Image: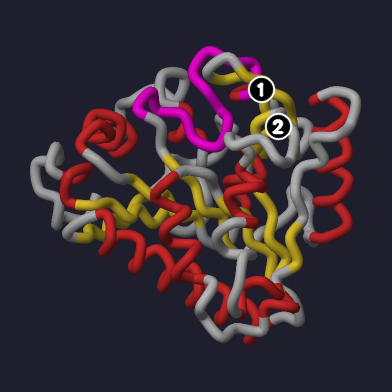
Amino acid sequence: MSAQPPASYRLETAADRAALSRLAAETIAASIDLALAERERAQIALAGGTTPEQAYHLLAANHLPWQRVDVLLGDERWVPADDPSSNALMLRRSLLAEGPGAQACFHPVPTALESPERGAAAYDALLAQLCPGQPPIFDLILLGLGDDGHTASLFPGTAATGVVDCNVTVSEGKGLPRVTFTAPVLSAARQVVILVSGSGKQQALQRLLDPNEPAARTPARLVRPRTPVLILADAAAAAGLEDPTKQP
């Protein structure tokens, strides 16, 4: 990853969490629409969390050709599919619950396998089948930003942040094993969107946008696509910036 140039960022702010959810849903829908105008299928990878969940409920109402959309997860906790902390369960209760979005082709992390390592290997193989390119190229990857600077399940101080020779790896965060895309996959996407909500994320957002911030402390800075990273933030998260309207 060191050979890649630093990421550039484009910031859009919304008044509150509800407006942020609407903006995120509109952004994802537009990305899918663009991808399907150019290719037969679209591949997107989504994030867990309460703010994305609100956006997914809104996204589900969009009348897109969902049967041509492959939906994956950028990371998943190593828990059963019916566990309340499962990102797959959250997607099934939001985007996939009802309406047009229920027709999307969802590919969850296989957490019923014997170990996170087996799950990571199986998900890696799935990526190779679904997505062209090495690393696989997603049309859109939606990410969150932890208050510690992590994104997907690339947590500070974990070996997963340095994995560059495979597309999916095992990590650990907040006491749970996890399966996560690696930084090269996150960086290969045609569009990367980072969703940031709440005053508790102010410092993490400042660090993400700081060109002198080391990726070792803020792993979200490992995500370095060729196109600018689109940051969608609510006013509470962006309030810590000197000028939230200024393009970073």
Which residue is drawn at the image coordinates 59% and 37% (left, top)? 84
Give left or right: position of 43 versus 151: right
For the N terminus, give its image quadrant.
top right
Residue at image position (51%, 53%) is 142
Helix, strand or loop under label 2: strand
State which tag comes first along the sequence, 1 or 2. 1
User: Which range of residues does the magenta coloring cover?
Assistant: 147-160
Nearer the observer, 241 or 188:
241
Q: Quadrant of residue 208?
A: top left
Question: Residue 28: x, y in percent?
Answer: 49, 68
Label at residue 76: none
Q: Position of residue 69 (x, y in %)?
A: 70, 72
Label 1: few (<14), some or many (≥20) within 10 Å?
many
Image side of residue 226 versus residue 12, left or right: right
Magenta stretch secondary structure, dominant: loop
Dot 2, crowdedness within 10 Å: few (<14), some or many (≥20)? Answer: many
Vertical order, 203 against 6 (above or below) = above
Which label sits on residue 171? 1
Kind of residue indicated by mark 2: Val
Query: Magenta includes 152?
Result: yes
Report if residue 161 lies within the magenta region.
no
Residue 58: which quarter of the image?
A: bottom left
- The residue tagged with tag 1: helix, strand or loop? strand
Q: Looking at the image, which residue is at 74% across and 29% down? A: 169
Vertical placement of residue 35 versus 194, above or below: below
Q: Looking at the image, do the residues carrying marks 1 and 2 touch, with CB atoms under 8 Å apart?
A: yes
Give the numbered dot on residue 179.
Answer: 2
